[in-house]
Each structure stands twice: as structure tokens, then as C-alpha cells.
Image (cartoon, helix red, strand yellow):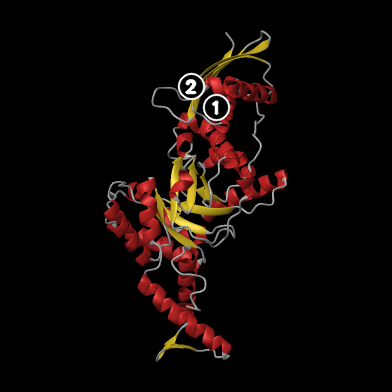
Amino acid sequence: MGKIGEAGRRGESIRSDCYVKVELKDSPGIHITLKSKVECMYGDKIRDLIKKELDELGVQNCDIYVEDYGALDFVIAARVECAVKRADSNIKKEFLLPAVSFFEQKSERERLRRSRLYLPGNEPKFFINASLHRPDGIILDLEDSVSPNEKDAARILVRNALRNVDFGECERMVRINQGTLGLLDLEAVIPQNPNIILIPKVETGEHVRAVDTKITSIKKEKSLANEIFLMPIIESALGCFEASYIASSSSNVVALTIGLEDYTLDIGAERTNEGKESFWARSVVVNAARAASISPIDSVFSDVNDLEGLYRSCIESKSMGFEGKGCIHPRQISVINQAFVPSEKEIEKAKKIVLAFEEAEKKGLSVVAVGSKMVDPPVVKRALKTIAIAEKTGILKNNWREE
């Protein structure tokens, strides 16, 4: 018996995935056994894909068995590559399908990050339609949602997804692992143009700089020009005390967020929906982010069935200065997006301030007045941001001044 490697999932409940078993042999030839519900339509196409991949990976002699449960090409390719590398760890080559046009999509330093949806990195069934729920960002997670023995499989799958899945207008994010695993994650995903790398369990600015340096090295090696931003995650008491240094540790940091499950565990508290036990830590994150001129983003709300509680939590987060919140289920997205847009009252107030500011500028005045009240520059800046958000989200038309 030769070397054997397996990858993927099998079973009646599996969808958009496949199971692959590879046995590397000394006897010549590639022998493919395919079991698929779409055999009559796509069987030959799947076999051709597998043959091409094995050839590029340098595999000349093997038996390969595939159970297909509606997997797309990028998933099949990822599972085959993982199975081959599990059979022979000396195989280092990658098999990359041609990149689609949206692969080059860029992000911006300042953009809406109200909602970010976590997707387990080893669950391709969640990838395909994730953008239909319209989160501002999609996080392909390689850390907590992936079991230790599936880290290699998830890494290849996420790499392929970044290259071949259309995530629409969503910002494409990847949460990497800690330590050596995180560096391996970066080597796989950075060439595939992610917009943001989430760095988990950050406790020092040096931690962020190490990731930033690795990204710079990969970009130089691969001749990449794409801009990649960073979002450190504070998840411990020490991280909170170092938050200001973390927030300002790199010019590529655009947002700072907090992970409350690990934080409350670290301080020996029970996490509650009311959040009294984390109020100080969340305030620290807001102030550290604002001091560094980046966005503060709140943690996830863990009860996916309590949408009223989620909305109240969002309103509280917004009142503290946060600009967004994490999601662990698509049903949370619309609630969060709605909560983190300006209210009608806020917009009307902002419109008056902006109009007064623009009128003062025309007259060459350095003082802005709304009615009988003088308006300070920070208030004007906040009003301009409110208007910008209202315009981006379609609440306010771009020609509102004319109306």
C-alpha cells in the first residue's frame, strides 16, 4: 500500500463540498474513481480538472477516489491538493485556477465597516452566497472556527476562495492563526489580494509589526502592489493595557476590534448581553482607536436568536463610539447595518452644520455658526462624517443640498 491522504467531507448532509482520498503508488498511471450526482453533466469536466491538477502538482502515479456533493471547481481543487499534500508532505507546489476579474478588487482606508460576517474557513457551503446578505465585510476565518487538524485544509480552501469566489462589494477579510500557523496563512492568502488581515489575540505592538513585516516581505517577493490593511483584535487584559500602542503600531492598521469571549475568560468573568463586565475594555478600545485615527469595531453578539437584544447592543455600541459590530449569522447583518447608520434627527442636524460650514468657507470666515450657536471644528468634522455615511448608505441623496 502506498502513501494515503484524505481531505474534505462526506455524508448525506454535506453540500457544496467533496471528499477526496489519494493513494500514491509506484505502479504507473492515474486512476480516478468519481462518485457524483452530476456525473452525466460534469463528470468528464471534473476528471479533466483532477488530471490537470495532479500533473501540475507533480503526481504521476496514484489512485484517487472522489465523492462529489455539488462542489465547485475551486473546492474540488482545494480538496485534491490537500489530500495529495497529506499523502506526501514533500509536495510544496500549489494548484491555482485562473483568477476571476473581481480578484483585483481594492478597498479603502476609510470605508463602511458596520458589519463583518465570520465564515468558517473549512465550510465552502457558506462562501458562495455570503455576499447576498450584504455585510460590509466577509471574514474567511482560519482561527477559532477551524479545528486544529483541519488548519491545512482551510488554508488552501480560503486561498482558492479569495481567488475564485465573487464576494460582491464586501470587503474581503481573513482572520489568520497565531504564531507559525499565522505565518503559513499569510504565505497562502497574501498573493490572493485580501483587503484586510485580522490578527487575533494581539497583546503588543510588536505582534502587529511582525505580521506587517511578513506581509511586506511576501509582497516584495511576489511583486505585489495591492494595499493590504490590518485589523488587530484585542482579546485579553494585557491587550487592553497595550491598546494604544497596538492601534498605532503600523500605518496599515485601519481598525481596532475586541473579542469578548476570550477577554471575559481572561479576566475570569461571565459574558452577558448587557456587557457590564466588558464596558471598561470596550471603552479602552474606542479611545485607543480614536487616538490613532482609526475605526473602533465592537465584538460579536453571541445570541443569534435575540435580534432585539442585538439591536439594543448595537445602539449602546454606537453611543460608546464604535462604528460596527461582528456577525456570526447572516440574520444579524441587517440589524447591525440599520443600527450603525445615522438617525433622521442626526442627519438633519448634520445638514444644518455642513451648510453653515460651507457658507462660512465661501465668506472666508473661520467661525461657523448654526443659528445663535458657535460650532467647533470637531463638531463640523463629525457632521461631515455623518453626511458621508448617509450618502454612502443611500439614506441621503448626493444632491441633498439642492433639495
Which of the two residues, 278 or 378, is positioned nearer the viewer here?
Answer: 378
User: Quadrant location of the N terminus?
Assistant: top right
**Residue 56 visible in the displayed image:** yes
Number of residues whose C-alpha sits closer than 10 Å to that of mark 1, classed few (under 14), some (14–19) or many (20 or more): many
Which residue is painted at 67% across and 45% down in the image? 218
Count the numbered circles shown.
2
**Residue 200 visible in the displayed image:** no
Residue 176 placement (x, y as % from top left): 52, 43
Which of the two residues, 206 or 89, is positioned nearer the viewer here?
Answer: 89
Mark seen at residue 351: none
Amino acid type of disc 1? Arg
**What is the distance, in whole Å, between disc 1 and disc 2 at their CAs?**
18 Å
Mark closer to the chain start, 1 or 2: 2
In the rendered structure, the answer to whether residue 151 lies left or right of residue 306 reads right
User: Looking at the image, is 338 positioned above or below residue 50?
Assistant: below
In the rendered structure, the answer to whether residue 67 lies left or right of residue 300 reads right
In the rendered structure, the answer to whether residue 186 lies left or right of residue 129 reads right
Mark seen at residue 37: 2
Which element type, helix, strand or loop, lies under badge 1?
Answer: helix
Residue 107 placement (x, y as % from top left): 58, 56
Residue 331 placement (x, y as % from top left): 36, 48
Mark seen at residue 79: 1
